Image (cartoon, rainbow, N blue to C red):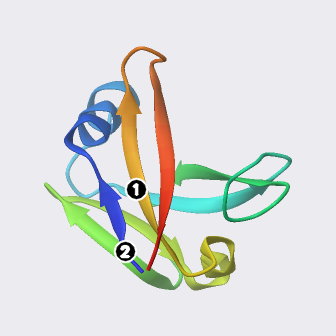
Amino acid sequence: MEIVISNKALNWYKDDVGLKKGDKVKFYPQIYGKSPVQESYAIGFSIDNDPIDMVVKTEIEGLMFYIDRTDLWFFNGHNLHVDYNGEKDELEFSYTQA
């Protein structure tokens, strides 16, 4: 499994969220949403600079994007792709089979 962050999404995280070198972004499942990989769950993210058990991670320009082992079930064997849609002014998450 891998996490793929587009340049547009990376810039959004730096500009809109204010991430700086050394920060860590955790992706996790949240109930009451929808995704193509889990019914009734969506993906969320938080700034978590104290990870417990990073099982999947991607580092770009000094920023770490990761998933904890306890949240791996959500992805159901899929890679996570994060992009930014400028027209909607929001992140878009998509999944491909790993």
Q: What label does residue 81 carry, if any?
A: 1
Number of numbered callouts drawn = 2
Q: Position of residue 85 (x, y in %)?
A: 40, 26
Instruction: For marks 1 and 2, give the CA distance.
Output: 8 Å
Q: Is residue 37 above or below residue 18?
A: below
Single out the residue that lies furthest toward the left.
61
Q: Quadrant of residue 76?
A: bottom right
What percent of the width, then of the height, locates residue 9?
32, 39
Q: Is residue 86 above or below residue 64?
A: above
Q: 72 or 16, which is in the foreground? A: 72
Q: Amino acid at mark 1?
A: His
Q: Is residue 95 visible?
A: yes
Label 2: state its secondary structure: loop
Tell me which residue sits at (25%, 35%) in the image. Answer: 8
User: Residue 93 location, x and y as percent?
Assistant: 50, 47
Above or below, 93 relative to 22: above
| Residue bearing mark 2 | 2
The quadrant of the image that shows the C terminus is bottom left
Residue 37 is marked as: none
* Screen quadrant of the N terminus: bottom left
The structure residue drawn at horizontal position 25% and vertical position 58%, both measured from the top left corner, is 22
Q: 12 or 48: nearer the eye?
A: 12
Q: Position of residue 38 (x, y in %)?
A: 75, 64
Local secondary structure at mark 1:
strand
Q: Amino acid at mark 2?
A: Glu
Kindly identify the residue that appears in the image at 68 percent across and 80 percent down: 73
Residue at 58 percent of width and 85 percent of height = 69
Quarter residue 11 falls in: top left
In the image, 50: left or right of 72?
Answer: left
| Label 2 neighbour load within 10 Å: few <14, some 14-19, many 20+ | some
Mark 1 Cα shell of 10 Å, populated few (<14), some (14-19), many (≥20): some
